[in-house]
Image (cartoon, rainbow, N blue to C red):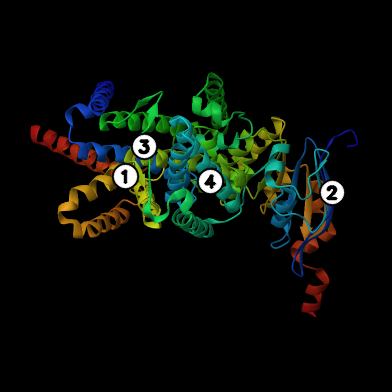
Amino acid sequence: MSEKKELLKVSNITKQFGGLKAVNDVSFTMYEGEILGIIGPNGAGKTTFFNVISGFDSPTQGKVIFCGTDMTGKNITQYCLKGMARTFQNIRVFNEMSVLDNIMVGMHNVIKTNIWNISMNTKKEKQEEAQAVKNAHEILQYLGIDEFAQESAGNLSYGYQRKVEIGRALASNPKLILLDEPSAGMNDSETIELMGLIRGIMKRGVNIIVIEHNMQFMMNLCDRIAVLNFGTLLTVDTPEKVKNNEEVIQAYLGREEEEEDHAS
Amino acid sequence: MKIQKNYVNIIKVIFAVAVLLIPFYITNTYALKIICNVMLYSIIALSVNLIVGFCGQLDFGRAAFAGLGAYFSAVTFNRLGLPFIVCFLGGAIFAALIGCLLGILCRYTSFDYLTLITIGFSEICRKFFINWRPITNGAFGLSTKRPSFFGVTLASHQSMFYFSLILLILCYIVIRRITRSKVGRAFKAIRDDSIAASYAGIDVPNYKVLCFVIGSFFTGLAGAAMVHYTMFTAPTNYTLDESIIMLQMAILGGLGSLPGSIVGAAILIIAPEISRSFYNYRLLFMGIMMVVLMLFAPKGIMGDGGLKDQLVAFVKKNWSKRARKGEHAGV
């Protein structure tokens, strides 16, 4: 473990909405080359936590250190430039744009051009654009949705839209992708396919953090799992240890004593 | 399929030649004037389309930018005696600068508030045109001269026709390139979902500003061309009504479709002129047209899934039906 490089370090993150502490004093470190899962019962603060580490919300207290840089308080664009990408719980694809364009939006910071090159349609601009189209098709092929390249993204089915979102995240050549409930609304076979896809992305040298409700999915996929409950971090450990952790079981199933009290 | 493509190309060439030769077979100055107006308004409609259709920012202040370009160009041309091209481009750049200012003010403003800001801004500009008499000559308006290049003045309507045509083609090409580039994709992404756009690494506030700058540049350019064409301008040309007409051109033609903007401009310029004989009902006619179109083809005429697409689908469906009937009859 010690030789692994730190990718994301979260220290003492607290996010407060009025009197409510949605995330309370969470710290952990994520290393390169692992899939980290975040689980927790409903309302545990998973999405808020995600929003904080992806730069959407700034934390009330604490620091987010990504790739050795303190990113606290920086805006989303700076997070993206540093190599972070994410997908959303309620899918956000660009409905009226073609699937290909959706992927190419993800390449926004990969394509280096300026307004002069664009208006003059210089050779450089043409080459870069052609290269971007080629790369986008490669990503689509990898995801198995190349046949829909010219289709409007809004017309695709839910599962395919997920893939478009993942493709868009991949297109920016990120170091870390945050997946917010990627298997929501998917059936079993689609979920298994998704798992394979995420492992494949991992092999491309991209690190992944996943939030999920689907326990089986998480236990099979993740190298380590962080458990949140009422905004506090219960544990960060391997799936087996998390499964047998007293606190985690209590968080999900309720306290035994309470039930006994009820019974008596 | 190939033959069809050839036909399309032939039709395109014929159309291009027909447009190029317009001044030779339409010698009526009144008609020529309208055509020039259509072309110049098309540029404005294109710029509106860029801001409203591509970037999704509902802008009600376009007329003010046409006015800024027009007044800047006319005033510098009259007062300073600079070469026409300098004043003309200066007008566009001035409009772009003011557009940048407005964009910066609206950077973090969401949809409806932005619309209100643009309305307020256009009123401010109009008041400026009326009240800054030493420069703008107030409500009396300002007269200026025709464009001239290297001592050659474009005095005739024919020469103005070619001037407007070249301007329109250049603007169209540049705007088309922008919309098909990284910048255009960023605009569309902001329109569809600004949060997802920012997570794709697009600097949303600055791209909004960029959109206003580019749009205002072209609006200002068209405004400057118009003032030198009509040789006169007055603050009444740059009211909110005018902005709404410009907006209608883009919406009628189909937001997101560049040829649509030209079609929209053509309809909204030509229709009132044709209907001058029943002038009193002109606005009623335009209003009904707008309502009907928005109800049945909200994407406009040339937009994606708009009136044109609907008609094409309708014709195709009926044709195939007829073909099938023919087969049945044959059997």
Q: Residue at x 32, y 44 (%)?
A: B265
Dot 4 or dot 3: first in sequence order is: 4
Dot 1 or dot 3: first in sequence order is: 3
Could you give the CA–CA distance between mark 1 and mark 3, rounded to whole angstroms? 29 Å
Q: Which mark is residue B99?
A: 4
* Residue B227 place in picture, x, y as percent: 37, 41
Instruction: Give the chain letter at badge 2.
Output: A
Label 4: element kind:
helix
Question: Which image quarter holds the C terminus of chain B?
Answer: top left
**Residue placed under numbered mark 2 in the picture:** A28
Q: Residue at x 22, y 29 (%)?
A: B23
* Residue B176 place in picture, x, y as percent: 44, 33
**Residue placed under numbered mark 1 in the picture:** B264
Could you give the CA–CA distance between mark 1 and mark 2, rounded to whole angstroms? 58 Å
Label 1: element kind:
helix
* Three-letter residue code for mark 2: Phe
Instruction: Give the chain letter at badge 4.
Output: B
Label 2: element kind:
strand
* Residue B140 place in picture, x, y as percent: 37, 53
Left-right relation of A230 to A85: right
Camera sees residue A251: yes
> Closest to the observer: B169 or A12?
B169
Q: Residue at x 62, y 49 (%)?
A: A88
